[in-house]
Amino acid sequence: MLNEDENIKKNENFTILEITHGNRHMKEVYNQIIDFAKEFQVSRVVLFGSRARGDNREKSDIDIAVYGCNDFDSLKIKLDEELWSLLHIDVINMNSQYISEELIEEIKKDGIVLYEKV
């Protein structure tokens, strides 16, 4: 789990608390995503979209990009089963060959690393 003082985005001092604007519920959701990433031995999870940019609404979905997951389908099912009632989570498999260049650029531009295996 992330502590409030750990860096999220490289070269910047974002914390889970800052990207959730102090919303305890969202902090719990992000920490649950991180726990699942560890369980499925994911190499990296990046938050992108409106929640990463900070222009989200209360009911905006959560967009995450997943790198290095050998069992992506099971991870996606687990996220859907465990977190679906909270908010919709759009999970992108970055190891897929069908990712558009536009999406890759959006993730590079706005993405905030939630988890990275060391």
Image (tube, grey):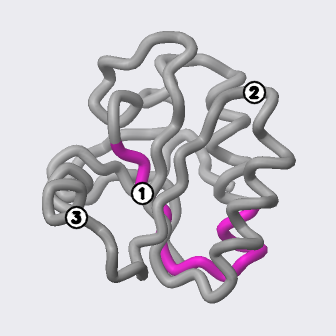
Which mark is drawn over residue 100? 3
Query: How far, Cα to Cα, is label 1 from label 3?
Result: 16 Å
Which mark is drawn over residue 46? 1
Mark 1, mark 2: which one is toward the viewer?
2
User: Can residue 61 be found in the magenta stretch?
Assistant: no
Which mark is drawn over residue 86? 2
Badge 1, how many Cα within 10 Å: few under 14, some, many 20+? many
Badge 3, how many Cα within 10 Å: few under 14, some, many 20+? few
Give the mark nearest the N terminus, 3 or 2: 2
Q: Answer left or right for 50 relative to 84.
A: left
Q: Amino acid at mark 2?
A: Leu
**Are the two marked residues, 3 and 2, in contact with CB atoms closer than 8 angstroms?**
no
Rendered view: 100 above or below 39: above
Question: Disc 1 on helix, strand or loop?
Answer: strand
Rendered view: 43 above or below 107: below
Rendered view: 26 above or below 72: above
User: Can residue 39 be found in the magenta stretch?
Assistant: yes
Q: Camera-side residue: 7 or 24? A: 24
Q: Answer left or right for 83 relative to 27.
A: right
Q: Residue furthest top?
A: 58
Where residue 112 sits: x, y (%)? 35, 49
Question: Disc 3 on helix, strand or loop?
Answer: loop
**Are the two marked residues, 1 and 3, in contact with CB atoms closer than 8 angstroms?**
no
Magenta segment: 36-48
Question: Disc 2 on helix, strand or loop?
Answer: loop
- Which residue is at a point 69% across and 61% down the rendered structure image? 76
